[in-house]
């Protein structure tokens, strides 16, 4: 199965109670692609500057990620700087240096245009729409976004949201986009607007999947040592779509499984800075934690 | 099985986006007892003033709740006044008129002293300890509390917490008591201190059960119309212990089931003001929603 992931490729400067690291590998497309790579081959489209270390490209390639769509432009790579205090649910942005990302034009290489699975990581909704138009006949498209686009390009965002199969939002984005404190009514409103499926990511509280009268609630993995939450949402989405792309099965049952796999990979991703935990992660680790998810949610049937 | 519930009996004045009601039946022991009554006979110990409407006592008795331990004192019944804004997770207190509750002396009637199941709803931890001392040999004791006691009687609270089998805290109380933003490390610290089991209630995000290396995560029921959250935590605890008291089975498996039953009853309780939804609730309703909980958390086993 062919999986296309379009989004940011970044060098992040991140400070958490566990340390500070400068210009480490990050970006939505990177976190998502590496997460997906445990299940599927990935074609990545993004942009970096001339300063982007070649070792990062090597790492992506080793993970089976095709970087033919990774544009290298004159200038510097997108740089995000932020910190987390003891409440790791809240990222505080210090600086966002868009650099070459400011003029990102997501041209999809011809060989990727018949991709069956597409993840539109968080970028300008107008660019997400432009990507969608270049894909001939996607079997499944998933979209992520952020508060900035809800504030500045809400109309365009709603436009593209209606064209994809699944929209992934976090709690705050859901409340902000639908102007409601109640996540359930927010999700229901999106479905009424014509969105096919909605996933709400709730960080430490797990995530929710909505589709018509079908509803699935997944917890998060209980971690008492969360080192760096950066990229958790992207690795969730990457693991989710990567598993679906590999299996080719879009049934409710398999969608639920994919949600747990996404949650599993995200839970590993936050155990270290950047993609460091992902470098050592094995399929066996994923299987182990997947089973633990099952174990911690099961209860007997009748009362 | 004999179930004793000790806590507040109140007349509440509650305002939510769905209306305002004055001096309606409430109190931690009332919400817990009515929830438990769907499964078990309940012996209630509390105090009211002479103004407490006799119809409320009739209602409790109809539910199979023995009110021989309900003291009637000269003066007025405990009155709590509060409101909720659109974010229903947050109660705002306007007034707390303790009235006869200020001098509550929880004397346990002799016939209740061999109770096997005890729920110590939210009262002064010194009084909770006093109750515990009067019970000969409880098979299971469960304790609830609130931020006020964490602020003013932390030492006494920790003392009684170590003597019960299960402590039930909400998110905020856990963070406050253990001085950590991380719920998982908070719970683990309580276990290290000698607490046997910890339940963390997270409102719309469900709840977590911790015991040594055993962990269970339950979602909440997806409600887009939450009318009055008052008593949700108490009806959770009441349903939980009521079911355990009826079944007499304290295995891990049954504990999980009891958590879902508590969540089910709490989810009904918030659908209307006061105990109004409980007046019409049937065992069949509970079974139906219990099955829905199962349906919304299941996923297939292997990857």
Image (tube, coloured by chain):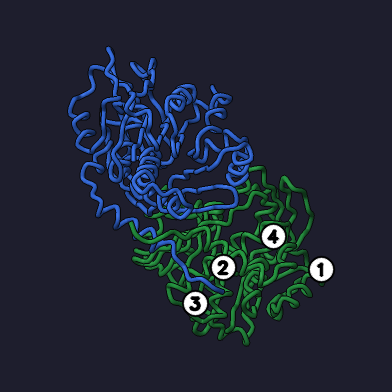
Chain colours: A green, B blue
Count of marks placed on residues: 4
| Residue that carries the numbered disc 4 in the rendered image | A98
Where is residue A130 drawn, in percent x and y?
Answer: 54, 74
Relative horizontal placement of residue A158, taking residue B284 as reference (left or right): right
| Residue that carries the numbered disc 3 in the rendered image | A140
CB under 8 Å between discs 2 and 4: no
Which sits earlier in the primary sequence, circle 1 or circle 3? 1
Which sits earlier in the primary sequence, circle 4 or circle 3? 4
> At 49% across and 22% down in the image, what residue appears?
B126
The 10 Å Cα crowd at callout 2, few under 14, some 14 to 19, many 20 or more, is: many
Q: Which mark is residue B23?
A: none
State the residue in front, B275 or B88: B275
Q: CA distance from mark 2 to mark 4?
A: 31 Å
Residue A122 in view in this figure? no
Q: Nearer the viewer, mark 2 or mark 3?
A: 2
Which sits earlier in the primary sequence, circle 1 or circle 2? 1
| Residue that carries the numbered disc 2 in the rendered image | A261
Relative horizontal placement of residue B11, taking residue A19 as reference (left or right): left
Disc 3 chain ID = A
Q: CA distance from mark 1 to mark 3?
A: 32 Å
Q: Secondary structure at mark 1?
A: loop
Relative horizontal placement of residue B237, taking residue A283 as reference (left or right): left
């Amino acid at each position: 199965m062919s999986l296309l992931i379009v989004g940011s490729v970044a060098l992040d400067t991140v400070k958490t109670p566990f340390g500070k690291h400068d210009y480490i590998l990050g970006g939505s497309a990177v976190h998502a692609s590496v997460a997906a790579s445990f299940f599927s081959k990935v074609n990545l489209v993004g942009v970096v500057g001339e300063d982007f270390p070649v070792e990062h490209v090597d790492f992506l390639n080793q993970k089976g990620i095709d970087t033919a769509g990774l544009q290298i432009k004159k200038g510097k790579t997108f740089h995000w700087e932020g910190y987390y205090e003891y409440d790791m649910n809240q990222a505080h942005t210090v600086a966002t240096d868009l650099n070459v990302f400011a003029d990102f034009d997501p041209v999809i290489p011809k060989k990727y245009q018949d991709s069956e699975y597409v993840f539109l990581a968080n970028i300008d909704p107008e660019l997400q729409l432009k990507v969608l138009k270049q894909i001939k006949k996607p079997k499944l498209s998933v979209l992520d976004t952020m508060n900035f686009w809800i504030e500045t390009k809400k109309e365009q965002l709603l436009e593209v949201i209606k064209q994809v199969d699944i929209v992934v939002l976090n709690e705050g984005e859901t409340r902000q986009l639908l102007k409601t404190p109640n996540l359930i009514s927010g999700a229901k409103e999106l479905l009424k607007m014509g969105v096919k499926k909605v996933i709400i990511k709730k960080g430490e509280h797990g995530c929710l999947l909505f589709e018509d009268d079908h509803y699935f609630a997944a917890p998060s993995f209980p971690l008492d040592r969360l080192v760096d939450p950066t990229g958790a949402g992207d690795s969730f989405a990457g693991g989710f779509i990567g598993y679906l792309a590999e299996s080719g099965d879009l049934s409710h049952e398999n969608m639920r499984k994919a949600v747990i796999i996404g949650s599993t990979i995200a839970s590993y991703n936050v155990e270290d800075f950047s993609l460091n935990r992902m470098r050592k992660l094995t399929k066996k680790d994923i299987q182990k934690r997947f089973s633990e998810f099952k174990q911690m949610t099961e209860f007997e049937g009748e009362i």
